[in-house]
Image (cartoon, coloured by chain):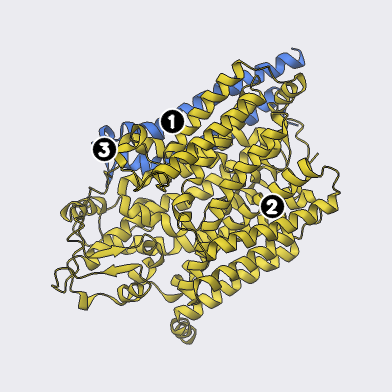
Chain colours: A yellow, B blue
Amino acid sequence: MTTSLLLVEAISVQNWTYILVGLTFALYIGIAIWSRAGSTREFYVAGGGVSPLANGMATAADWMSAASFISMAGIISFAGYDGAVYLMGWTGGYVLLALLLAPYLRKFGKFTVPDFIGDRYYSNTARIVAVFCALIVSFTYVAGQMRGVGIVFSRFLEVDINTGVILGMLIVLFYAVLGGMKGITYTQVAQYCVLIFAFMVPAIFISIQMTGNPIPQLGFGSTLSDGSGTYLLDKLDGLSTELGFAEYTQGSKSMIDVFAITLALMVGTAGLPHVIVRFFTVKNVKDARKSAGLALLLIVILYTTAPAVSVFARTNLIETVSNKEYASVPEWFKKWEKTGLIVFDDKNKDGRIQYVANKDQNELTVDNDIMVLANPEIAKLPNWVIALVAAGGLAAALSTAAGLLLVISSSVSHDLIKKIINPKISEKGELVAARLSAVGAVCVAGYFGINPPGFVAAVVALAFGLAAASFFPAIILGIFYKRMNKEGAIAGMVVGIVAMLFYMMKYKLGWFDEVLPDKSEWWFGISPEGFGSVAMVLNFIVSITIMKFTPEPPKNVQAMVEKIRIPSGAGKATGH
Amino acid sequence: MTKQEKATAYWKENIKYLFILLTIWFLVSYGAGILFKDALDTIKIAGFKLGFWFAQQGSMYVFVILIFVYVRIMNKLDKKYGYDN
């Protein structure tokens, strides 16, 4: 017993990382071989018989990306109250998905989102517009994921970022191409287990250390365990204002912007093709509703823990570094300084770390990602916990990348080749096309991972705005408004996505002006991240106005709408 | 009831439930977490100011409950109209 404990203590972080990452990768590859896809139905929708719980877990892993796992808690810890836009935005969308979309799209019973748009609006133009929107949304999103895989590899295995990206590409390629949706679904189930375990273990340890409460969700509302009787949040509010930051529980964004960003993220979540398509994989409408509930429950476990981690980490950071001698900082500080994620610039040469809001006096720059990545070290947790965070981060990035790649490949092989270019293609031919487009998509994603264009990081957050501005209104009106016709829907989608792209290029990327326009020029004071909600409203208005002046949809389409509103008799999902 | 009437009645009831559930969805997130946050922050439960708690915790718990309530309501409704096969 004692010898084995000593052995566990002696294994370095590096070796633990090799062991845990190696084991989880072997597991994913094993699952991929076991669940090879033999038909297009298996490749696109995993055969359509996935249980609600398995689909819920797969959806949760699909949804929670490297951004949720690594960056979110860090972003919140610097944004305070304002971080709520991500928490509410990325979970509230599931209520819309469960109540307004998933059951009806499952009843409709085809393979992809452009399938629904094309059939409901009896038009290949609508289908092509939808494919175009799906590709823009998915590519902006997936490039960020591949980069995330590269970064996690490089930090924990000490290979360079490009080697990391290529390793990640090979793994995703293996199970996405071999198994299609079927392979992805069951690897995502395993990845959910890995990532949630990896996120919760350090959070629980730190919660006990700081407040004595093992439940992080309650811990960050408790008193400190130092016996002072002070509430943790009160202490952090005090520390923040002392250093000149906004009070932690107040935040600094305007109310209208918080409202707009939350709405854009919620609606965008409900409109993301890689999330919607997961609900095509269950047996019937009843299972679609149930698995949406389970997916959200599994997501909320991480999402309610993240703000607690943010509070613990921010308090720890301030206490450890603020106004301390640089010579006496702990080892983790020096280690992360090497990676450039912590930068200390002793402006007044007093040898102490001034961490304050005032930009001219502040000497410490901390990257958001540190909060989760370095948390176990800051809290002095054992080596295996530190390695676990690496395995969890990789699981989160790989599962999301795979889900997105499948949407891209099915958009090409199914929506473009089968439905538009060559409708006579055989099932076998389509399956080959699907696999080849998956290979192509991985290569493009990998290219962007290795050579990230400067605007990728800025644009990833806007993928939600794009989804909100394009798909969401078209799908909602398609289900809830029988009179909605192709003219209205197409015009709405085009105006919505163009408005969003324009606002993004002007106010986020600054492509139309010499310098990036100032906040004060934002329309209604709404940031580019929040503009998706304005573009969505615009889409609704344009759709309905154009519809009023154009003919109503054919009788058979109206009959189809009536049919998808009734839950019974949802057949197997088909491509025909 | 003809098949058509039955379908219409089912849809009407469905919309009514959607309306109620989405009103709650709006009130806990946009209401308690954003619009009325400052007022609710004057109330404190343990270390949490209430508005802050709704924004970073409470709204998410309610979201999960809402979906499971919806699942129950719809399963009952499907049975009532014989759409549960």
Q: Are marks 3 and 2 in contact (CB under 8 Å)?
A: no
Q: Chain of mark 2?
A: A
Q: In the rendered structure, which amino acid carries the disc numbered 1?
A: Phe
Q: Secondary structure at mark 1?
A: helix
In the image, A346: left or right of A184?
left
Q: Secondary structure at mark 3?
A: loop
Residue at image mark 2: A409
Lower position in the chain sequence, tag 3 or tag 1: 1
Q: In the rendered structure, which amino acid carries the disc numbered 3?
A: Asp
Instruction: Please state the horizontal and vertical placement of residue A373, each as a whole percent of the image.
Output: 41, 66
- Same chain for the residues at labels 2 and 1, yes or no? no
Q: Chain of mark 1?
A: B
Q: In the rendered structure, which amino acid carries the disc numbered 2?
A: Ser
Mark pair 3, 2: CA separation: 48 Å
Q: Quadrant of residue A99?
A: top right
Q: Which mark is residue B41?
A: 3
The quadrant in which the C terminus of chain A is found is top right
Q: Residues within 10 Å of mark 2 (few under 14, many from 20)?
A: many
Q: Nearer the viewer, residue A332 or A465?
A: A465
Q: Residue at x 34, y 48 (%)?
A: A515
Residue at image mark 1: B26
Q: Residue at x 47, y 37 (%)?
A: A532
Q: Chain of mark 3?
A: B
Q: What is the residue that sits farthest to the bottom in this orientation?
A: A3
